[in-house]
Each structure stands twice: as C-alpha cells, then as structure tokens.
Amino acid sequence: MEKIVLPDIENLHLIDVYEKHSGFAAAKKAFSQSPDDIIDQVKKSGLRGRGGAAFSAGLKWSFMPKTTDKPKYLCVNGDESEPGSFKDRQIFESNPHQLIEGILICCYAIGAKTAYLYMRGEYHKWIKLMQKALDDAYAKGYIGEKMKETFGTDFYCDIYIHKGAGAYICGEESALMNSLEGKRGYPRVKPPFPAQNGLWGNPTTINNVETLANVPKIIEKGWEWFAAIGEPKHPGTILFGVSGHVNEPGIYELPSGTLLTDIIYNYAGGVPGNKNILCVIPGGSSMPPLRGDQLEGVKMDAESLKTVGSAIGTGGIIVMDENTDLVKVLARIAHFYHHESCGQCTPCREGTGWMEKVLQRILRGEGSISDIDLLISIANNIEGNTICALGEAAAWPVRYMVTRFRDYFEARVSKEINLPIANKVHSMRNTAVPLADITK
Amino acid sequence: MNFTFTEENIKRIEQEIKKYPEKKPAVMATLYIGQEQNGFISNEVITETAKILEITPEEVLGVVTFYTMFYQKQMGKYHIQVCTNVSCMLRGGYEIWDQVKDKLGIDHLGITEDHQFSLEEVECMGSCGTAPMIAVNEDYYENLNKEKVEEILTSLRNAK
C-alpha cells in the first residue's frame, strides 16, 4: 500500500531529498493551471478535512470570494491538542516540505498571499524543525517573492509560523484566528464564516496540517487516483494514531475504511497480555467511545463510523483493556474539557465543571444512581448551547460513555438516592415550604 | 523592578511584528521573548510589551492569563511537566506523576525551595504514541518508566 503523507523515504525532511522525489513538481504543475481548476480537482478527489469535522476541502476552498479587494489568508491548523492525536508532529518531523508544497498550492487556489502555520506552543522541537524547513525552502526560492523566478509565475506567497501557548481551544478555527490576532483564544459566533470574515475581517481558509499535506499528491497523480483509495465517500489514506493498551502504539498511515480491529491487532500489535478490549475511542478523546464487543467489522472512515454511532475525529484511536477503570478515564477526560473550556458560554464553563465533580464523586465511591442521569442531563444541556464545538467535545464522551457502559457505571454507584443537603434545600425552594422550616 | 528588552530582543520582536499586517498579533511572541529574558511575565514585562506593540497593558494581561505557557511567577530552573491525560494515564502517567511529586516534594505548579525544580501536571502534549512522557523545559522525554524518570531527575539534580 502506497503511503501519501508519510512515505518510507529516508531523510525526506531534507529539502535536497524532497527535491529528488519529485519535490515541488506538483506546485509547478498547479501554477500552470487556473486556481478554479485546482479547486475543482481537490473537490473531485473527495479529500475531506483531517482535523475532525471531515468537511470537503475543495468545497471549503470554493467558499472563498473570487472578487474582493481584501487580502485573503490561509491558516494552517497545527495546534494538535486533542488527547490521542499525535499525527501532525510526524508530518512536521518527517515530511515538512510536502506540507509546505500543499500550503503553496492552497494559497494559489484560494488567492492568498499569506499563510500562517499555527503550531502548538509545546511543540518547541517541531517548530524549530518546521522553521528550518521553511528557511530552506525560502533559500531555494520555493516560497516568497523568488517564487516568481523559480516557478515562472506571477503568483507568490509567504508562510509564517505562529507559536501557540498551550490552549486546546485554539485548535477551533475561529479561536485560532483570534489567537493569531493577538487576542485571547475565544471562539467566534458563526456566521459569519471565515471565508467571508476571518483574520482581521478578511476572507480566510483554515485547513488542518494533514489535509494540506495530501494536496501535492492529488495534483501530481490526479484526483482519480486519490479518489480510488479507500472508501469512496472519504477517500485517501488517514494517519491513524494508536495509543493506550496496545503493544506497538504509533502512527499508521492506512487507507480509509481499514477495519478498526485490523489496525489494533495487525498493525498496533494487539493488546498486551492478550487481554480483552473494554472500550475504544476511535477519533481522539472527544469522540463517542465504542464498546469492546462493538468493534467487529467497524471501518475507519467518517461515514462508516457515523453508522456505528461515533466519528472519525482526528483518527486518534485510544484502546483500553478489560482492567481499565472507565470512571477514572471519563473523570480524566471531563477534567481536561473543564480545564480547557474558554469560559465564554455558561453551559460549557459550568457544565464541564459539574460533570467533572459528579464523576469525581462516583470515583470516590460516593455516587448514587441519580448521578448517572444527572451526567446525561448536564451533557444534554451543554450540547448545542455553546458558541463552538468544545461543548459537544465535552458532552459526547460523557453522554456516550455513560449510556453505552450503563451497566458498568451502575455497578459503581449506590442504588439509593442520597441528595446532598444543598440539593435538598434547593428542591424545597420550589415548593410552598416556608424558609423557616428549611433552616430547622 | 525595572525591565527593558535588550537590544537584540527588540530586533527579534521587530522580526516577529513583520509577519503581520499590524503589531498586536506579535504579542504572544513578544511575551515568550520577555519570559525568556526575565524568567517570568512580570507586570513590567506586560507594560513593556504593551508599549512596544502599542496596545493596552490590559490586553496583554488578558493574553497572559489565557494561555498556560505564560508564567506570572519564576518557575524552577528545570520545569518538569508530566502528562496525565488519557493515553499517558493508561500507560502509567499517574504513577510517574506521583513519583515526581514525591521525589521533588512539591505539587502542581509548586517550586522547590532552591528554585531548581518546578512541577506542572499538563494536558495532552501529543506524545500519546510514546506514552508516558514528561517534558523538562522544552525537551520531551518519552516511552518512560520509573527507572528512566529516576535517572532523569537524578541527572538534573547533579547538573545544577
């Protein structure tokens, strides 16, 4: 199976090696065609965003206004902070020039003169590697004004790295733009969408690192070639990151639609001690988890996962064996989203904290049966009531974990409903009980 | 306590400003440089940053408090970050967290008395495939076990 994003070529991160492997030929080919042609090819290839939403990349590009006096921008999302996701860092490390080439082609297609590569602050090493790659590409005239000579076109663009500083929410596209503008990373209300009103109010496209790294090969080998790989509705290869209880965790680039069990047992070497699998999160911590007995026949692509009640997310597969304490896992996930909630929307700011507290209570062995429904109720009250998708990201794991493992959670709580004192008072307030009686 | 950016750092900040159509977006880069020079983000660093970028100190403070990688107090010479998020947790992240905590005698965001070490429980660092991990300042140490952590801490202690 041919790999698109992370081919097995030694030292491909060096520009000389990349050049030898038809490096920057795709950009040259792209610049000889019209931007609309490029968008059309990417659309037909079926390339879908690899950052979580799996939205058609070509369609996204086509939203950019054709006639405008405003400058256009491309933001490349390399904030990669979703627990279980560690794919972009492999691209920064092993194939940075293909990413650069993808950025150039995208900039040409959407008419952007400037691209910002937003990288998470903790990736100090990979920021340095990426900066080195950019410097090399600048020196060889593949980026910047020199492009005119190198490629013999009128088009040129610049690529800059913007270093984040440890906020998960900046991986959300509108928060990323606010962060880039030098503000707190608060997500924006949509609409207006970035294509109309993005960076500094200008038309902006935001793509994930892996999405753009696919583009050069689509241009080079043709959209028909790409569209034929893997599942027709979500074609291409996907970088699956397998972590948790497997013998060989790591990144595996495989065609979309590869069986989840195949990835876990054949590629990631199975579960240590041949234990049974209790639970798998298929796309990073915010995606609905699957039961261990639900895995047979599950294909890893956006549409197939939808039919089994989960989502592809970032392709970060977290495997948990039968001895895992799921309450502890869920409490940890809830803690993460509580920590990372930006605080703009009340349902998320407060709800994520409540969910964490309730889960901590269950973990301490003080939970009651009503806590399980309380968790679902909180999750339902967050979902759909927030500006950005962090609300869903926090609500989904809780709601689906509790629903799908209800027996497991029920076994961890007492059957009696022990309302804390504060709740008793609260419930009495709605009745006609005089205040004096409550305080007795 | 006075603080002014060194001439060399002013040049670095100017380079950062050039990336953007206005000055404000360079605030994160400027704060990183300020933190590097001063050791942490003091009020003076905030005022200087605001002055250079022609924004208000409040705007700068808003940025400082939003992001976890800006520190408003002097952290240890070696800032130890332990990931305890799911993928690390499943492979022993909490054992390592407890080990480091016990060894250094400090808790989350604590600093040892000699200011050699500080500790932070961090969220996913993107090392899920090489879990568990710790980061010391900017460097990742991955695929860890208790022995390796012991070795890292001992060598850092001896390196002071």
Image (spheres, coloured by chain):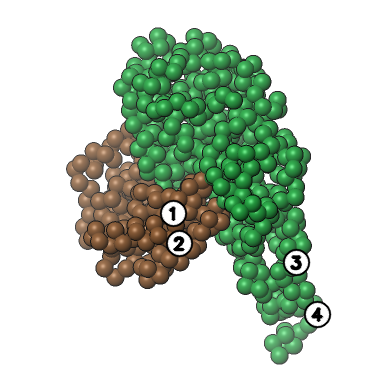
Chain colours: A green, B brown
Q: Secondary structure at mark 3?
A: helix
Give coordinates of residue A167: x percent, y percent.
48, 50
Both on one chain, marks 2 and 4? no
Both on one chain, marks 3 and 4? yes
| Mark 1 or mark 2, earlier in chain | 2
**Which label sits on residue A432?**
4
In which chain is the residue bearing label 1?
A: B
Residue at 49% x, 16% y is A26
Both on one chain, marks 3 and 1? no
Residue at 77% x, 62% y is A407
Q: Secondary structure at mark 1?
A: loop
* Residue that badge 2 annotates: B96
- Picture quarter containing residue A225? top right
In which chain is the residue bearing label 3?
A: A
* Residue that badge 3 annotates: A410
- Given residues A31 and B115, the one toward you in this image is B115
Residue A5 visible within the image: yes
Q: Secondary structure at mark 4?
A: loop
